[in-house]
Image: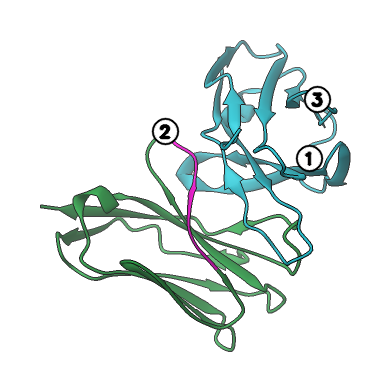
Amino acid sequence: GEEVAQTPKHLVRGEGQKAKLYCAPIKGHSYVFWYQQVLKNEFKFLISFQNENVFDETGMPKERFSAKCLPNSPCSLEIQATKLEDSAVYFCASSQSTGAGNQPQHFGDGTRLSIL
Amino acid sequence: QKEVEQDPGPLSVPEGAIVSLNCTYSNSAFQYFMWYRQYSRKGPELLMYTYSSGNKEDGRFTAQVDKSSKYISLFIRDSQPSDSATYLCAMHLSGGYNKLIFGAGTRLAVHP
């Protein structure tokens, strides 16, 4: 599609439960990025993919967070054993890979995760 | 110290005013600079995308990058109530596959 599509828009989980978020990048975009937006607009980078391969995972809390981008499926971000501090809006972005130069990242509208 | 500093505001201006938004950064390796607009409960929307130093204009928006001072600006001319949003600066190293480093965002309110 022409937009980054994220589902669900809002997800509520009890502390300790699993949460799974999905992202369909813009068609033709090779790179997918996940960011976490916490209070006061602070964006934190989590992980990026080039197609189905992890490109940069330096921001991932590896103990409970995992992510995948499989062929012909939406990308996913999964949080095991959620904690109150995981409450945030999770944004997915995608960008195009071209030989002509760099391309900007385009964002979806996010998934608001609330941990109770 | 944060890599990118941005005054969170809020900034309140009357309709028709010229708005100036700014960010400073510490990493001289940043090559690409962006401004995003974010409305409440929506994702960041790309406004301007610039490479290295210089100016770029698009309609009522002008982006400036001064790499020698590690300072970037966004100017909005003839501001409208519909411009009321949070404005985020972001930047990354050379290579569009690199992660974005964001400023904290500036909340702007344009009142009629």
Circle 3 or circle 2, nearest the eye: 3
* Location of residue B102 in the rendering, given as x and y in whole percent from the top left corner: 57, 57
The residue furthest bottom is: B68
The chain holding disc 3 is A
Identify the residue position indicated by label 3 in the image: A72
Circle 2 or circle 1, nearest the eye: 2
Q: Secondary structure at mark 3?
A: loop
* Chain identifier matching the cyan colour in the rendered picture: A
Task: In this rendered view, identify the residue nearer to me: A35 or A80.
Answer: A35
- Residue B41 bears which disc, if any? 2
In terms of image quadrants, where is residue B108? bottom left
The chain holding disc 2 is B
Label 2 vs label 1: CA separation?
24 Å
Task: In this rendered view, identify the residue nearer to me: B9 or B84.
Answer: B84
Task: In this rendered view, identify the residue nearer to me: A18 or A5.
Answer: A5
Query: In the rendered structure, which segment of residues is drawn in magenta?
Result: B42-49
Q: Amino acid at mark 1?
A: Met
Q: Amino acid at mark 2?
A: Arg
In this rendering, the answer to whether B70 lies above or below B5 is: below
User: Mark 1: few, some, or many residues within 10 Å (few <14, many ≥20)?
Assistant: some
- Residue A60 bears which disc, if any? 1
Q: Is residue B32 left or right of residue A100?
A: left
Label 1 vs label 3: CA separation?
24 Å
Q: Is residue A99 left or right of residue A42?
A: right
* Location of residue A18 in the rendering, given as x and y in whole percent from the top left corner: 72, 14
* Chain identifier matching the green colour in the rendered picture: B
